[in-house]
Amino acid sequence: MAWDKNEFRKRYNTLARLYDPGLGLYRAVGLRIEAYRQQTVAALQLRPGDTVVDLGCGTGLNFPYLHAAIGESGNIIGVDLTPAMLAKAKHRVHKAGWNNVTLIEADISTFHLPPQANGILATLALATVPDYSHVVAKAASSVNAGARIANFELQWPERWPTWLARLAVFLNRPAGVTPDIVRRRPATAIERYFEHVETRELYFGAAYICSGAVPERS
């Protein structure tokens, strides 16, 4: 069974100090996690001066790629449920000397997106929210037409042998990955509420990047 938000907050407050080093396990099995993050940011098509919201920003691993895209004149808004993860993100921001990052402790399912946002990013976060479809729908209705969303998620690898897929989920269990979470598909909601949607599978179908644009309103 998937953790609820209180369990996620509790567990990730404990996991925060191990989260970044723990990603080495992904690299060890060939999951190019940094490259996928960078490709997801690229799908937002950000420009210097843009405002971007990173939903479930965690320790701020996306921030270097976002900052490179928007420059000093842009703004990054990082939203996360867990104080300890945000503390790590704050340290990252301070170490880099960035003055255009705002960190907000909030549940992404109830967070109100600023209408001026040009990009909405979610990496390994949307599928942890049971009402992810509501989050996507609210994003599409909250920001201006033309703004983009990009989502990187793990998913159930249909082409894998069942035993191997189950093993992969089991190994990711300490990070809250469960069979029901990887069977959730935020990409379906993005396809419903956004336009010009592109979805690309990664790692032999175990992950994907999905992006799209807010449609013009009549």
Image (cartoon, rainbow, N blue to C red):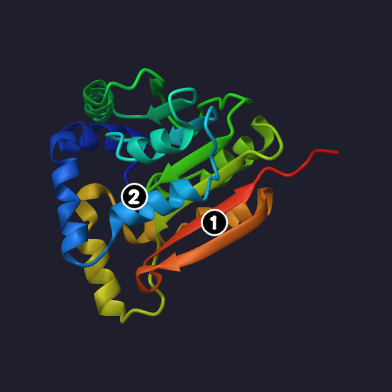
Q: Which quarter of the rendering shows the C terminus? A: top right
User: Would you place residue 6 above or below residue 183 in this image?
Assistant: above
Q: In which quarter of the image is residue 60?
A: top left
Q: What is the x, y in percent for residue 4?
A: 35, 40
Type of amino acid under label 2: Ala
Q: In which quarter of the image is residue 162?
A: bottom left
The mark that comes first in sequence, 1 or 2, is 2
- Whether the residues at callouts 1 and 2 have beta carbons within 8 Å, the answer is no
Where disc 2 sits, the SS reads loop
Callout 2 crowding tier (Cα within 10 Å): few <14, some 14–19, many ≥20? some
User: Would you place residue 146 above or below residue 92 in this image?
Assistant: below
Q: Tell me if I can see residue 129 in this picture.
A: no
What residue do we see at 14% from left, 35% from top? 17
* Residue 38 or residue 198, whichever sits in front: 38
- Which dot, 1 or 2, sits closer to the camera? 1
Q: What is the x, y in percent for residue 90?
A: 27, 23
Q: Tell me if I can see residue 100 in this picture.
A: yes
| Residue pointed to by mark 1 | 187
| Residue pointed to by mark 2 | 2
